Image: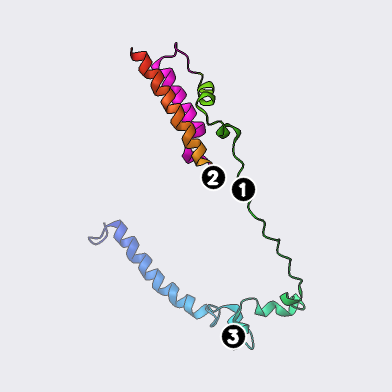
Amino acid sequence: MLFKQSLFQSVLDRLDSEEDGSEKEEAAHRVRGLNVSFAATVPGGETPEAQRPDEAYRDNLGDPVILSELEPKPEPAPQEPKPPVMPEHLSRTSREEVAAELAITSDLKREALQEKRRSFAKANHPDSVAALFREQATIRMTLANQLIDEAIRRLRR
């Protein structure tokens, strides 16, 4: 320790004293006006157009392109959205057709019947089809649930 100061504190004091002198030297070497943008220091920079950063380079760019001279692109004709096509399986809404699709047999266990219900709902649930075909999907789901519930009741006997 030097004069009841830690080594660290003495280094900090020395750095502070060096910075004060270096700031004065640095201020003497600064050129006034370099901290403002280039566009503002260009002669004639008082006008609002000249305050753009690219204004100093306009003479190098050549003639400006006028956008109104360009031909406007024709807008494509709006097409009417095509109506959704109903999946073929939604047209089969009779009890016999749904029963044939489910293929329920008497040897199926409860777990297998529940799996058939889940897979049928995955393909036919009314929330997963277009709004136009929800009625057919609802009919098919109702019939499938009735058939599977009857098969589960028969297992309990």
Residue under label 1, please give it. Answer: 83
Q: Earlier in the sequence, mark 2 or mark 1?
A: 1
The residue that appears at 27% across and 60% down in the rendered structure is 2
Is there any visible trace of residue 18 in the rendered image? yes
Name which of mark 3 and mark 1 comes first in the sequence: 3
In the rendered image, residue 139, in percent from the top left (x then y), is placed at 47, 34
Q: To which residue does mark 3 refer?
A: 48
State whether residue 6 is above or below residue 134.
below
Amino acid type of the residue that numbered disc 2 sits on in the rendered structure: Leu
Q: Residues within 10 Å of mark 2 (few under 14, many from 20)?
A: few
Q: Nearer the viewer, residue 69 or 131?
A: 131
Residue under circle 2?
A: 132
Residue type of the residue flagged with mark 1: Pro
What separation in Å lies between label 3 and label 1 (alpha carbons)? 55 Å
What colour scheme does the image use? Answer: rainbow
Which residue is at a point 50% across and 33% down the rendered structure image?
Answer: 124
Range of the magenta residues?
104-132
Front in this rendered view, residue 46 or 34: 46
Give the SS element for disc 3. loop
Q: Is label 2 in contact with label 1 (beta carbons under 8 Å)?
A: yes
